[in-house]
Image (cartoon, rainbow, N blue to C red):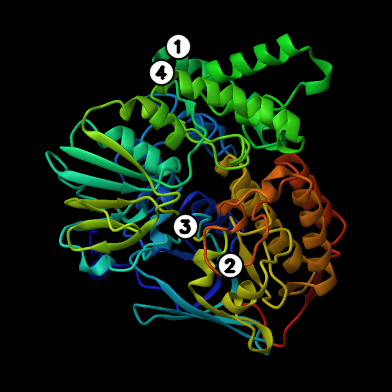
């Protein structure tokens, strides 16, 4: 990564608000708080803006939300002055878009890059956070807004012996900016989630040999990614008002929604809906066919078998089908993250690609020559690409030493139980706001720009309402947090997601308390509940004033 520490914008010593992270939510939060007139600054460990689109530079990284909905909707001109080249653009184009947003809003002057927050400590007397960085900064700040990302704490140290490997080993979320020369090399990819799939289908034609280690087979949907010409651009830009009025209120924050009930249709009609949504080449089958797939096991199985048959027809090879297609006893379609793919299954039909099942013969360790399985088999490779996931939702904030009231630390609290209030604050941590955190739709089940815009707008409103009330400290009450957790659990436990082992409930991280990380009641419903909380005067929170006045 490019080192820009010598040119870094200095961190102010005192602030009204500090925003951690300059991805989708951090940039918009910085803009809003600055518009409020607060003395606000943002910082990021990266050398530039982008968040997930800065760090995830692996081959094939791209949207699986349609580009024209993965956008900010607070400014029509900002929306319309950017033009996408295709339906699902790649990382480089997305990063350019984020630079466009940053520069259009003149945000760089209030951002410090190449700076990692190491600790944040709350002082009850002053009502201020003291924030320390790896560059030696110490900042006193009234409101700490953590926009650190839901998938930004990669699980890099997954196997014994990684440091012994003679070749090169990289995690997809820390893929080097300059890329890797994979031409003619023997490459291993560990992991076949959404990221692994994008890598595998992209690099297979250039490597000498590709060995893919498959533990959990994935349901996949084929992506249709047409290029956009003037007609397509005019079509989506002409829908700005429509998208702005509908997207925030759908179940998943996409433009489409669940519109028909399974029980109201005949078997032939149901099948036609599945065919039509599958043929759309998007996530529509998952997010807008039948909502009953998340609750009813019989419906789940019928839809799952529909997808399995589509996959089997493409693979044909019984051995590959056994390794790559989920079985009826595995899990239901949609209860894991559903990846979009482009000829991913066909990649395994290439002579230079081998799928190795590690479900019953797991990876034991990384050895100097390559990857060693439990039965002693060693696969010799030159490069290992690890697409092994993240400590989702809670991971990024848990890696900062955050100390609230009475010496409570956020990492320790979340080691005991994953709890928040509205997915945006935590009892015992006053004036600490979060986006993409556990128990909100943005933790997993949402078009991210939809949910992150909503959360930052709520946080901004909360800070404004707090200051307008003559107070400067807000904190969830214990009873308020209990009520939100109970509502979240009641909603989540009614779904099949809660009965499925995946990163959606923390099952991919040893020792992590199990709880469905994402609010499953729907994006529109969540928005309504958050708005009601504000309109009723924040009954799940307590506001108070400290002896020391705010800095502005």
- The residue under label 2 is 512
Q: Which mark is residue 37?
A: none
Question: Where the C terminus falls, by quadrant?
Answer: bottom right
Mark 1, other Cα within 10 Å: few <14 / some 14–19 / many ≥20: few
Residue 26 shown left or right of residue 182 in the figure: right
Nearer-N-terminus badge (4/2): 4
- The residue under label 1 is 231
Q: Residue furthest front?
A: 375
Q: Could you tell me how far apart the alpha carbons at marks 4 and 1 are, in whole angstroms?
A: 12 Å
Residue 117 shown left or right of residue 8 in the figure: right
The residue depicted at 15 percent of the width and 37 percent of the height is 208
Nearer-N-terminus badge (1/2): 1
Label 2 secondary element:
loop
- The residue under label 3 is 390
Q: Give the foreground label among 4 and 3.
A: 3
Q: Position of residue 242 (x, y in %)?
A: 66, 24
Nearer-N-terminus badge (4/1): 4
Mark 4, other Cα within 10 Å: few <14 / some 14–19 / many ≥20: few
Residue 293 shown left or right of residue 8 in the figure: right
């Amino acid at each position: 990564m490019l080192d820009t520490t010598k040119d870094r914008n200095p961190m102010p010593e005192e602030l009204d608000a500090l925003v951690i992270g300059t991805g989708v939510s951090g940039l918009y939060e910085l803009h809003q708080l600055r518009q409020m007139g607060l003395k606000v600054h943002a910082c990021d460990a990266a050398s530039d803006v982008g968040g997930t689109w800065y760090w995830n530079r692996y081959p094939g990284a791209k949207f699986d939300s349609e580009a024209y909905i993965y956008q900010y909707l607070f400014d029509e001109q900002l929306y319309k002055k950017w033009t996408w080249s295709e339906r699902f653009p790649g990382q480089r184009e997305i990063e350019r878009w984020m630079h466009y947003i940053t520069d259009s809003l003149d945000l760089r002057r209030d951002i410090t890059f190449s700076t990692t927050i190491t600790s944040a400590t709350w002082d009850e007397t002053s009502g201020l956070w003291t924030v320390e960085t790896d560059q030696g900064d110490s900042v006193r700040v009234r409101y700490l807004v953590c926009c650190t990302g839901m998938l930004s704490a990669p699980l890099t140290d997954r196997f014994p012996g990684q440091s012994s490997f003679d070749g090169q080993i990289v995690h997809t979320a820390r893929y080097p900016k300059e890329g890797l020369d994979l031409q003619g090399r023997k490459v291993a990819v560990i992991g076949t989630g959404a990221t692994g799939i994008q890598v595998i289908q992209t690099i297979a034609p250039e490597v000498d040999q590709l060995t893919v280690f498959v533990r959990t087979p994935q349901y996949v949907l084929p992506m249709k990614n047409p290029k956009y010409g003037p007609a397509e651009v005019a079509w989506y830009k002409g829908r700005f008002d429509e998208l702005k009025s509908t997207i925030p209120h759908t179940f998943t924050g996409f433009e489409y929604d669940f519109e028909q009930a399974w029980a109201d249709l005949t078997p032939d009609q149901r099948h036609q809906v599945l065919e039509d949504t599958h043929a759309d080449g998007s996530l529509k089958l998952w997010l807008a066919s039948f909502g009953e797939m998340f609750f009813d096991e019989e419906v789940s199985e019928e839809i799952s078998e529909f997808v399995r048959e589509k996959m089997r027809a493409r693979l044909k090879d019984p051995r590959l089908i056994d390794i790559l297609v989920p079985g009826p006893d595995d899990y239901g379609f949609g209860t894991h993250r559903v990846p979009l793919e482009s000829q991913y299954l066909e990649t395994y039909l290439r002579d230079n690609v081998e799928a190795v099942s590690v479900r019953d013969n797991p990876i034991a360790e990384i050895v100097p020559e390559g990857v060693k399985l439990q039965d002693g088999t060693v696969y010799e490779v030159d490069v290992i690409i690890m697409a092994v996931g993240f400590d989702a939702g809670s991971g990024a904030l848990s890696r900062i030493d955050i100390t609230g009231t009475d010496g409570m630390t956020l990492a320790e609290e979340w080691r005991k139980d994953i709890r928040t209030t509205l997915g945006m604050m935590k009892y015992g941590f006053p004036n600490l706001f979060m986006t993409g955190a556990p128990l909100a739709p943005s933790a997993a089940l949402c078009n991210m720009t939809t949910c992150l815009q909503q959360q930052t707008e709520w946080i901004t409103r909360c800070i404004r309402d707090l200051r307008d009330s003559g107070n400067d400290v807000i904190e969830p009450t214990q009873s308020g947090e209990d009520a939100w957790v109970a509502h979240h659990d009641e909603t989540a436990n009614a779904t099949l997601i809660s009965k499925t082992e995946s990163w959606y409930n923390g099952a991919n991280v040893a020792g992590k308390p199990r709880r469905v990380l994402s609010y499953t009641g729907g994006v529109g419903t969540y928005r309504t509940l958050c708005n009601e909380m504000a309109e009723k005067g924040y009954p799940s929170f307590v506001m108070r004033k400290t002896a020391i006045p705010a800095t502005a």
